[in-house]
Image: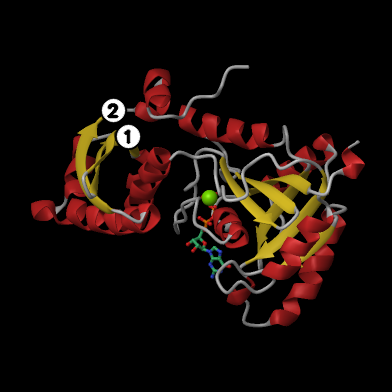
Amino acid sequence: MEDNLKTKSLFVAILGKANVGKSSIMNMLINSKVSIVSPKPQTTRNKVIGIFTDNDVQIVFIDTPGVHKPRTKLGNFMISEVNSAFFGAQVCMHVVEAGKSCDDFDLELIKKFKKANLPVILAINKIDTLKDKSVLMPEINAWKEKYDYKAIVPVSAKTCDGKEDLISEIINLAEPSVFYYGEDEITDKTQRAIAAEIIREKLLCNLDKELPHGTAVLIEKFKERENIIDIYATIYCEKSSHKAMIIGKNGSMIKNIGMHARKDLEEMLDFKVNLQLWVKVKENWRNKESDLHTLGYEELKK
Ligand SMILES: Nc1nc2c(ncn2[C@@H]2O[C@H](COP(=O)(O)OP(=O)(O)OP(=O)(O)O)[C@@H](O)[C@H]2O)c(=O)[nH]1
Ligand SMILES: [Mg+2]
């Protein structure tokens, strides 16, 4: 019966090490920013769905946290998000960085690809950073030795080089099916959840080193009144010294974070936003089940 369908769809899990550009690639492919991006590894913490619909084809991407060695319960949650992305996916996209060779984390993923027995496309990202493009061919050959990839596509999420090749390799694998999402949907995340992520992105981009890894954002209020949306959010951090750094001298840092977050929120919502931020300390929250639950980092029990 499915053969009679005029539409096709495909669920694609995007997997790879931290910071290789998985979220950037997903945003590029769906032509919208639904997953936050930062220069710091371990930016993505939860799975994020991004939907691309073009005429009779719908591709549902599942962006995942970067594969890493977890050191906290939050890290364990992130790895469980990676593992659960295999369920329901029909194809995997392994993202790696141009100029870098296969390491133990990639090998660990390759083991999972073998076990899942799904077609895998390799996206070699950040080709814009290569001074000498002739290194690409030997790199492609080296990856071919590691795994029997369905396709290998060099790409740059920064310049969009290779974007069309990548999307057409993915569309080639789409199967007759109904659409699982509306044609104008781009994600399953609520605006509230995206707002929390946008604020976290600004923390990651503005605060030094490890500090933002110990932060989480909880939206306390998200309400439209007259011609403005009130968004009240609490930023949690692990130490009072961190709280002082997030607030900054005379409140300069929190003002800066608020200003950048408000700008993005207004763009996303196409509405004026009144953003109020508070900073609170929750010691060691990354290792406490109840805090992880409150902050949205809990595995769904089957
Ligand atoms: N030069 C260059 N930088 C890129 C490209 N793609 C992503 N980046 C940068 O690489 C950094 C990481 O990008 P993300 O998309 O957050 O990477 P990720 O794999 O989702 O990272 P995690 O969520 O931490 O696992 C950011 O600073 C991006 O701007 C690219 O094609 N070229
Ligand atoms: Mg990411």
Which quadrant of the structure image shows residue 282? top left
- Element carrying mark 1: strand
Give the residue at x 33% y 38%.
217
Image coords of residue 225 (percent x, y): 22, 41
Q: Residue at x 60, y 30 (%)?
A: 80
The relative height of residue 185 versus residue 79 in the rendered view (above or below) is below
Q: Which mark is on residue 218? A: 1
| Residue 283: image tag | 2
**Residue 302 horizontal side relative to residue 177, left or right:** left
Q: Residue at x 43, y 19 (%)?
A: 289
For mark 2, give the secondary structure: loop
Whether residue 239 is visible to the viewer of this picture, yes or no, is yes
Compared with 146, 178 (above or below) is: above
Q: Earlier in the sequence, mark 1 or mark 2?
A: 1
- In which image quadrant can residue 302 be found? top right
- Rendering coords of residue 230 (x, y %): 23, 42
> In front: 48, or 45?
48
Which mark is in front, 1 or 2? 1
The amino acid type found where label 1 is placed reads Leu
What is the crowding at mark 1: few (fewer than 14 residues within 10 Å), some, or many (at least 20)?
Answer: many
CA separation in Å, label 1 and label 2: 16 Å
